[in-house]
Image (cartoon, helix red, strand yellow):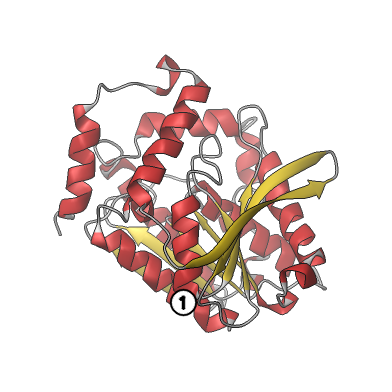
Amino acid sequence: MTLDPGIQFVLDQLGALEEVSPGEISLEEQRRNFDNLSQLGSGQSDGLEKSYDIEIGLVGRTLRARVYVPANRIGRGLGVYFHGGGFVLGSIESHDGTVGQLAVAAKTMMISVDYRLAPENKFPAAALDAIDSIKWIRSKISEFDCDESLIFLLGDSAGGNLAAVSSNYLNSQSDFVICAQALIYPAVYWDETYSLTAFSEGYFLTASQMDFFNRSYLKDETDLKNPLLNAYIDENLRKSPPSLIVTAEYDPLRDGGELYAKALVESGVCVTSHRYLGMIHGFISMAGFAPGGAQALLDIGQYIAGFAQ
């Protein structure tokens, strides 16, 4: 299938801008640009009763988070969302519209977590923030009027990685159960694939960006053997919860996500895998331009609603 017209429009607009490599502008400006672009593309989250910020107090650090309560809330499920951005970019601001729309689509409360970013905080900082923030949220579950047996995880790209490694880690603990996860074009496979080469230029996420992200987050190649980064090699893969894996046809990470889905199935996990045709990496944050992105948000919400209610 050819590129979705809305996605092509986004790529054309980005192509009209002067191409700048990650090293040519400050990290602060890169982060600001990413937040602004994501907010512009995602559209508005109509249907919320309220959203408000909280602080997650952890040992040695405090994380920001944002709570989303949809007006159509049903049940006592609670979703914890981790944003994308290569472990370097992104925030609760960049994904504000996206998470709000997911909360409404799932009819379920969501909490978006602002984990520490690289290169200021190398691996495993983001993974530990994800795991510890989920534990903190569960410890406060009654304050959110939610059920600790109905916690599910979501994340896109790098955030999909954090959701996956957190699910595997926490579900290996005897007293913890993540009931489901939705991994959206997740960064969960670290070997070469066809899509990693075929779509590494001209489709939003580029080879140079991925190299920059990896160099920023990883200390060295030995990190690739750590299950807190590489969920694919985790011996606890069979303890993953029921999973939705979302991939995009023209995404460098497409094959890695689908290989992870296959590995989950082979480990006995119930998996729903959906490749969205005509889409690129980051397309759910382009829902304001691409109907396929808006439809994916509805599909993810429906999937989660089946567990959260």
Residue 277, by quadrant, is bottom left
Residue 246, by quadrant, is bottom left
The residue closer to the viewer here, 55 or 132, is 55
The residue closer to the viewer here, 158 or 28, is 28
Q: How many marks?
A: 1
Position of residue 57 measured from the top left corner of the image (x, y, whole percent): 81, 48
Quarter the N terminus occupies: bottom left
In the image, 81: left or right of 4?
A: right
Position of residue 108 measured from the top left corner of the image (x, y, whole percent): 56, 73
In the image, 299: left or right of 4?
A: right
The residue labelled by disc 1 is 303
Query: Where 37 falls versus 234 (above or below)?
Result: above
Q: Residue furthest top?
A: 24
The reply to whether residue 16 is visible in this rendering is yes
Quarter the C terminus occupies: bottom right
Residue 255, by quadrant, is bottom left
Residue for point 56% across, 29% down: 216
The reply to whether residue 262 is visible in this rendering is no
In the image, 146: left or right of 29?
A: right
Residue for point 46% across, 46% down: 191
The secondary structure type at the circle numbered 1 is helix
Q: What amino acid is labelled 1 in the image?
A: Tyr
Query: Where 215 falls versus 115 (above or below)?
Result: above
The residue closer to the viewer here, 307 or 189, is 307
Residue for point 52% across, 44% down: 93
Q: For mark 1, does the 10 Å Cα neighbourhood hold few (<14), some (14 to 19), or many (20 or more) residues?
A: some
Q: Residue furthest front?
A: 49
Position of residue 94 measured from the top left corner of the image (x, y, whole percent): 48, 44
